[in-house]
């Protein structure tokens, strides 16, 4: 008989403040191991056994697939930026406060990706013909899938799930084993929540350290060069951390608020033109670094 074992929730409960989201992308690499060339290289160099492999780019000279791959990489980076880690791979934590913003952005990713893939399919026959010229004797038409086959290799989708609560095991086993499973999951749950919040703290620490370094004048009193993006990223993080604090960590909120106060009314021009402003902001940022346990 299967039973539902329910125990009091332990650790920080985030089921009502976050959800799980997974970005899934499939792409054709257009790379193929050329065994003959690999063997020829080994023979030419008198190697004992296979010393390496030669992978050829089936679409050498074409850039459409490179653009798609670059877009996918940028999309993944944006996905990571908007979410927090949960499992080693796969789903990540998305704060509820960010759901509609994330969903809107994700819809634009998918629409753009599908548009780029559609254009790739239109140009694909021409790219295959060009590859015959580019690859010479290494060209093998059988290595190029038909468009209908390729369509199954390209996809981008986003899926959402609720965060599972701790203390709920549907198992048919002795109480001792159930308790062990509950304890095991409690530890995993706490570890995952800790990793998610650790990522938020790490983002803040990186921004603060960079600001201190760039706002510290050189030995001769000259100003160090810094980009406007330094302040833009700091202000973006102030906004992001407001929603990413899924455990309502008062320390993180205090650190975030302190950074917001340090930058209130301060422009990039102010920092570049005034040594006093740089000193004031840097001192406040250093105080945040020393006050909170990074």
Image (cartoon, helix red, strand yellow):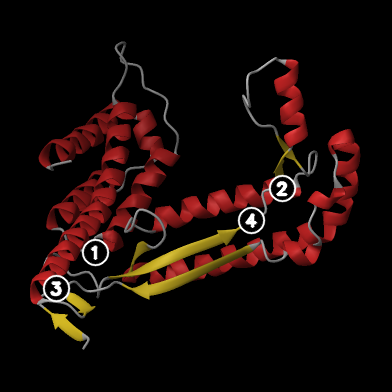
Neighbourhood count class around disc 1 (C-alpha, 10 Å): few under 14, some 14–19, many 20 upward: many
164 to 54, vertically: above or below: below
**Mark 2 / mark 1, whichever is N-terminal:** 2
Q: Does residue 235 lie above or below 283 as drawn?
A: below
Mark 4, residue position: 27
Q: Position of residue 60 (x, y in %)?
A: 79, 39
Secondary element under disc 4, as helix, strand or loop, is loop
- Looking at the rendered image, the disc whose residue lies closer to the viewer, 2 or 1, is 2
Between marks 4 and 3 in the image, the one whose residue lies nearer the viewer:
3
Instruction: State if disc 2 and disc 3 touch (CB < 8 Å).
Output: no
| Front residue of this view, candidates 170 and 28 | 170
In the rendered image, the vertical position of residue 293 relative to residue 81, given as above or below: above
Mark with earlier residue (1, 4): 4
Q: Secondary structure at mark 3?
A: helix
> Residue 279: image x %, image y %?
24, 29
Q: 264 or 206: nearer the eye?
A: 206
In the rendered structure, are the residues bearing label 1 and label 3 in contact, judged by CB atoms less than 8 Å apart?
no
Residue at the image position 85 percent from the left and 41 percent from the top: 139
Q: Kindly identify which residue carries mark 1.
A: 246
Place residue 228 in its image quadrant: top left
Q: Is residue 184 left or right of residue 240?
A: left
The CA distance from mark 4 to mark 2 is 9 Å
Please name the residue that numbered disc 3 is placed on: 178
Q: Residues within 10 Å of mark 2 (few under 14, many from 20)?
A: some
Q: Quadrant of the N terminus?
A: bottom left
73 horizontally vs 197: left or right: right
- Residue for badge 2: 30
């Amino acid at each position: 008989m299967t039973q539902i074992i329910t125990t009091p929730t332990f650790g920080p409960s985030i089921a009502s403040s976050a959800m799980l989201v997974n970005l899934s992308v499939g792409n054709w690499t257009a790379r193929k191991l050329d065994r003959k060339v690999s063997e020829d290289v080994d023979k030419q160099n008198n190697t004992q056994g296979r010393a390496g492999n030669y992978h050829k780019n089936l679409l050498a000279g074409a850039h459409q697939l490179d653009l798609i791959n670059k877009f996918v990489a940028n999309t993944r980076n944006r996905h990571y930026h908007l979410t927090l880690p949960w499992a080693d791979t796969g789903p990540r934590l998305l704060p509820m406060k960010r759901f509609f913003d994330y969903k809107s952005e994700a819809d634009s990713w998918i629409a753009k990706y599908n548009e780029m893939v559609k254009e790739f399919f239109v140009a694909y026959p021409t790219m295959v013909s060009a590859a015959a010229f580019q690859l010479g004797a290494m060209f093998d038409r059988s290595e190029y899938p038909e468009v209908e086959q390729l369509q199954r290799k390209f996809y981008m989708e986003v899926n959402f799930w609720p965060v599972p609560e701790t203390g709920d095991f549907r198992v048919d086993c002795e109480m001792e084993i159930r308790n062990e499973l509950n304890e095991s999951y409690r530890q995993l749950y706490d570890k995952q929540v800790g990793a998610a919040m650790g990522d938020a703290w790490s983002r803040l620490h990186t921004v603060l350290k960079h600001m201190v370094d760039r706002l510290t004048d050189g030995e001769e009193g000259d100003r160090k060069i810094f980009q406007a993006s330094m302040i833009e990223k700091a202000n973006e993080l102030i906004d992001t951390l407001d929603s990413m604090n899924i455990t309502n960590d008062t320390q993180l909120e205090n650190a975030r608020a302190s950074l917001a106060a340090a930058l209130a009314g301060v422009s990039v021009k102010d920092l570049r033109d005034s040594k006093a402003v740089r000193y004031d902001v840097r001192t406040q940022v250093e105080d945040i670094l020393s006050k909170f346990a990074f």
